[in-house]
Amino acid sequence: MQEFEVVVVGAGHAGIEACLASARLGLSTACVTLRLDRIGHLPCNCSVGGPAKGHIAREVDALGGQMAVTTDHTLTHVRRVGTGKGPAVQTIRAQVCKHDYPLFMQGVLRNQPNLTLIESECETVLAENGRVTGVA
């Protein structure tokens, strides 16, 4: 049995940022996901930005996250949206390459010290005395 200080289940946008933040703080971290080849997969929307996701992306970037960095490396084009409305709702949206974004993100995770990627399913969260002790 492997032991880690932090276990993150899932490798979508939030899981990626969580496991990278933990590993970058020097904590031994496991990222458990169903398929390693689907880390960072963009199933339906290849854009980062816009009025909602853009706000989150900027906050994640300000905290040292990876999403904006990967977007910069894999973007196909950028445009300003909401230009027909007032300046409060205008924002930028970047389109990323659906193929390159996950590949770049997978490389970042594979090369991150303190991070172990595990291809598996988590069915149970194990707890003792109100404290999470593992996953199975």
Image: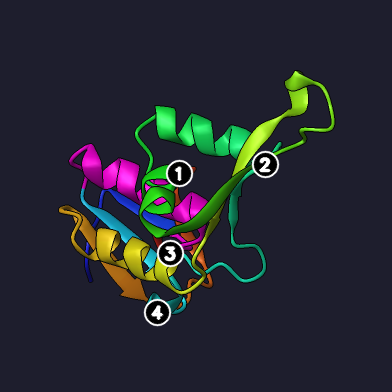
Residue 14 visible in the current orientation = yes
* Residue at the disc numbered 3: 101
**Tag 4: residue type?**
Asp
Query: What distance separates the C-alpha of mark 4 from that of mark 3?
Result: 12 Å
Numbered disc 4: secondary structure: helix
Q: In the figure, is residue 13 to the left or right of 65?
A: right
Residue in view at x 77 percent, y 33 percent: 83
User: Quick one: label 1 or label 3, which is nearer the N terminus?
Assistant: 3
Q: Is residue 74 above or below residue 52?
A: below
Q: Does the magenta stretch include residue 10?
A: yes
Provide the residue designation for mark 1.
Answer: 129
Vertical side of 28 occupied by 101: above or below: below
Q: Is residue 58 above or below residue 117?
A: above
- Camera-nearest label, 2 or 1: 2
- Structural distance between the alpha carbons of marks 2 and 1: 43 Å
Task: Write the start and end of the magenta stretch as one range.
Answer: 9-27
For disc 2, the marked residue is 50
User: Callout 1: 10 Å neighbours few (<14), some, many (20+)?
Assistant: few
Q: Circle 4 is placed at which residue position?
A: 37
Q: Do the residues labelled 1 and 3 touch (CB within 8 Å)?
A: no
**Nearer to us: label 4 or label 3:** 3
Q: What residue type is labelled 2?
A: Gly
Q: Nearer the viewer, residue 106 or 127?
A: 106
Q: Do the residues labelled 2 and 1 touch (CB within 8 Å)?
A: no
